[in-house]
Image (cartoon, rainbow, N blue to C red):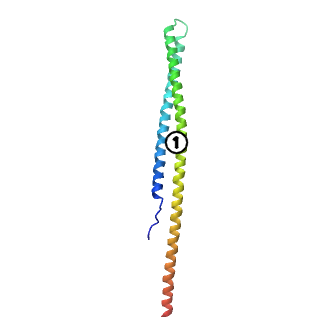
Amino acid sequence: MARSVFRLATLLKLRDNERDERRLRLAEAHAAEMVLRERIQQYEQQLSALGRDYHNAASPGKVDVDRLLDSQRYEAILRGEKASVEGQCELIRAEVEKRREALVVADRDVRSLEKLRDAQRLRYDQRQQLTEIKQLDEVASRLAFVEDGL
């Protein structure tokens, strides 16, 4: 019995590869976002530790003004770097959303072709079954004719 040939098989394969590529690109964007989030968390930890140090340096007793000024400068640098990374993180989030939407479109394209292929295969199988039934009916009618003739 011959198999059904899906004429759009090459297109399905291309769309499937495109979907896999988009899935990979989305995973890369997620990984980049995670790196930036970890970096933001590190800045928050450094700022928290700096705040504790700053509080300890400003406690009653002898005050080291230079140390306080250095701490304030370092805090300003950390906050600026953190703000910069947060901006990058926002850009990455937008890119993640864009890639997610592209993946949804690619997945929809693949599923529509798969549905078309499955429908074609089902129609082919039904035609094959009808052909087989007709052949069996013909064989049965010949046998019946032969038996009636005896």
The residue that appears at 53% across and 6% down in the rendered structure is 61
Residue lying farthest bottom? Answer: 150
Residue 64 visible somewhere in the drawing: no
Disc 1 crowd, CA 10 A, few/some/many (<14, 14-19, 20+)? many
SS label for mark 1: helix
| Whole-percent x, y for residue 111 in the image | 53, 54
Q: Is residue 83 above or below residue 126?
A: above
What residue is pinned by disc 1? Answer: 99
Residue lying farthest top? Answer: 62
How many badges with numbers are in the image? 1
Considering the image in quadrants, where does the N terminus appear? bottom left
> Picture quarter containing residue 83?
top right
| Whole-percent x, y for residue 110 in the image | 51, 53
The residue that appears at 54% across and 58% down in the rendered structure is 115
| Whole-percent x, y for residue 105 in the image | 54, 48
Q: Nearer the viewer, residue 69 or 96?
A: 96
Residue lying farthest left? Answer: 2
Q: Is residue 137 above or below residue 31?
A: below
Q: Is residue 97 above or below residue 54?
A: below
Q: Amino acid at mark 1?
A: Arg
The residue that appears at 45% across and 56% down in the rendered structure is 10
